[in-house]
Image (cartoon, rainbow, N blue to C red):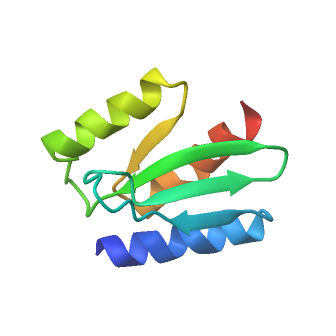
Amino acid sequence: MLEQKIEKQLFEQVRKRGGKAYKLTSPGTAGMPDRMVCLPGGHLAFIELKAPGQKPRPLQQARHKQLQQLGQRVYTIDGAHQIEKVLNEIQTT
C-alpha cells in the first residue's frame, strides 16, 4: 500500500471522529511529521506516514525527538491497520 493511501485513510478516520488532520509544512524546518491530528477534547498528536516497512529518516527521527522532548506525542504509521489503534490512544490519553 502506498503512503498516499494510508494518509487518505488516516484523514477519513480522523474526520469520522470529528477531528482534523492538518498537513504540516514548515519552511526552513525539514523533517517535520506529515500530519498534525487534532481530535475533540483537546487531543493532539503528530503523525509520520510511511510506506509499509519504511522507517523515518535520521532527520525525521531527530525532529520527532525534539517534539517529544516538548511533551508532544509523535507516531509513525506504516500501515492502515495501525490507524484505529493510534487514534484510540490519542483520544484516550
Where 64 falls versus 28 (above or below)? above
Where 82 falls versus 65 (above or below)? below
Residue under the image location 53 percent in, 34 percent down:
73
Q: Quadrant of residue 51?
A: bottom left
Residue at the limit of the structure toward the front, as seen here = 28
Q: Position of residue 27 (x, y in %)?
A: 33, 62
Residue under the image location 54 percent in, 55 percent down:
36
Residue under the image location 34 percent in, 29 percent down:
65
Q: Nearer the viewer, residue 79 or 68?
A: 68
Q: Split into 4 quadrants, where in the image is the N terminus? A: bottom left
Q: Nearer the viewer, residue 49 or 53?
A: 49
Q: Quadrant of residue 42?
A: top right
Q: Position of residue 82 (x, y in %)?
A: 48, 51
Horizontal placement of 47 versus 44: left or right?
A: left
Q: Split into 4 quadrants, where in the image is the C terminus? A: top right
Horizontal placement of 61 versus 45: left or right?
A: left
Q: Position of residue 34 (x, y in %)?
A: 40, 60
Q: Nearer the viewer, residue 25 or 23?
A: 25
Residue at the limit of the structure toward the left, as seen here = 58
Callout count: 0
Q: Position of residue 77 (x, y in %)?
A: 39, 52
Where 8 falls versus 34 (above or below)? below
Whether residue 1 appears in this view of the structure is no
Residue under the image location 48 percent in, 60 percent down:
35
Whether residue 76 appears in this view of the structure is yes
